[in-house]
Image (cartoon, helix red, strand yellow):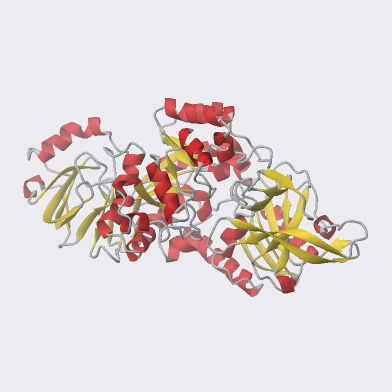
Amino acid sequence: MEHMTSLKTWPEAAPRLIAVAAGRSPADCVIRQGKWVNVQSREVLDGYDIAIAEGRFAAIAPDLSAAIGPETTVIEAQGRYMIPGLVDGHMHVESGMLTPAEFAAAVIPHGTTTMFTDPHEIANVLGLAGVRMMHDEAMAQPVNIFTQMPSCAPSAPGLETTGYEITPEDVAKAMSWPGIVGLGEMMNFPGVIGADAKMLAEIAATQRAGKTVGGHYASPDLGAPFRAYAAGGPADDHEGTCEEDAVARVRQGMRAMLRLGSAWYDIESQITAVTKRGLDPRNFILCTDDCHSGTLVHEGHMNRAYRHAVACGCDPLIALQMCTVNTASHFGLERELGSIAPGRRADVILTSDLVTLPVEVVIARGQVVAENGTLKVACPHYDWPESARRTVHLGKTLKPADFAIPAPEGANTVTARVIGVVENQAPTKALTAELAVVDGLAQPDETKDVAQIALVERHRGTGKVVNGFVSGFGYKGSMAIGSTVAHDSHHMIVVGTDRDAMAAVANRLGQMGGGISVWKDGAELAAVPLPIAGLMSDDPAAEVAARAEAMVKAMADCGCSLNNAYMQHSLLALVVIPEIRISDLGLVDVTKFQLTELFA
């Protein structure tokens, strides 16, 4: 595989670009006779050539044969569409359970050439040092991976304890790094609404640097609280789930980011703001947010989101703008990428159809990086230190008794608050259930689809376990599943029907150094080791995906029929999305942003 060379800036490349465009100098590469899909003017122009020099577009015209010299690489488009490389406006590399290098290797063949990533998962585990590791590996890749400095670790101060806390000083320091493009999603929306000094200091540091503030408003209230949040400075939001959410965001000057991840299906419900209500599409952006490795390997990445938008009735050229130039404009990079136009990075896809979008050739910075699904370049790895690989600290060997839930003295039954999982959506439901008490302990109830959930502290080795109940997975028999991916604090979440199995899973994850483990009838059915921060593997995506598929099958063998149930599992501690979650401090009522009792 080839290694990419470093990219010159536009001013550095300008003399050569001008010479090629003027016909005085041969290009490095010429793509001949394709359909130029122009996202600036929203039109398709047939019979055009593209000349590339120094990794950037030099000229686009009907005939650039004068730019072909003895050393020029010629690519025959053969009448295919020439579209800009696809851009993901908001995503978390860690959700793929892969490092940036292996994530890039997985998505390049799908036509993704630019990603705007928020590594707040690793920030919760390793702090600013972890963010720098992600940033540095991202900068080494043959495609564009920009980093947003995480804003909220913890995501909800006072309601959870993270491995590290991010400070305004950290944010200000990171703004000077070369690959930092803005502030990651501002999840602490109650903090912004309440004018919290720390949150506003992080926003101010970002705005002083002239960079973009990412948003995350996970409330259905579009009245005064939303207006207050918009006034605080977040410039986009991806938490919308209905048409009115998208409309409200663009009306307030924000970009509405519509996501299609492995478990989030929020494009269809919001894109009607464009397709039916006729709002200006330039303020709409497509993104993935969270995609696990199986989705990337088998279904795609931004090409999947694009196809879905088109299938939902969006004009293909408008959908393409939503995952190219709209996103580049939002981050202040429209003169750098997102369109096939002079001076921009030469990121282009050749495809024979704009609806099904087969990704036939992918060019990044003027070099062929993938062809017909095969990666053609190397994606360099960072040398991850031991400090990033040994992050699961349990403090003790856990016993079944650590997962016992004592009932109030003398009770024969209890009314318990239960976390209700909602398929394909991030929010949960705050439910209650009447549960039996046996030998003084509240019991899960398979007939009511109520299992136990435990959050095991894993950053400081305190040995603390917080127990509760969860519904919606459909688990049956003696089983447990545990994961050290637990957005956003990334403690360990264990869900099960049997305390012995729950203890076995927790101890196994401690020995493994992090990842996922599924147990049934006293034996492990599947495991996905994630040795880097307990979040990622630096193995190839196909290998991680195969382990993840075995994990999904194991969950099904335990009775679970939810789509992408593991994603739901990993969000059970996400204390900034309603209605109810679990943290290392207890059960959290996210409608009130306060701790609540397990028993009603």
* 62 lies left or right of 31: left
Locate residue 241, reporting x and y percent.
48, 55
The answer to whether residue 396 is seen in the rendering is yes
Locate residue 467, reporting x and y percent.
76, 55
* 366 lies left or right of 497: left
Locate residue 191, reporting x and y percent.
58, 35
Q: Nearer the viewer, residue 311 or 192?
A: 192
The answer to whether residue 4 is seen in the rendering is no
For the C terminus, which image quadrant?
bottom right
The image quarter containing residue 370 is: bottom left
* 402 lies left or right of 173: right
Locate residue 26, reporting x and y percent.
12, 42
Q: How many marks?
A: 0
Q: Residue at x 21, y 38 (%)?
A: 343
* 49 lies left or right of 220: left
Q: Residue at x 73, y 60 (%)?
A: 469
Q: Residue at x 75, y 56 (%)?
A: 468
Q: Is residue 9 above or below residue 415?
A: above
Q: Nearer the viewer, residue 570 or 229?
A: 229
The image quarter containing residue 332 is: top left
Q: Residue furthest front?
A: 223
Q: Is residue 8 above or below residue 355?
A: above
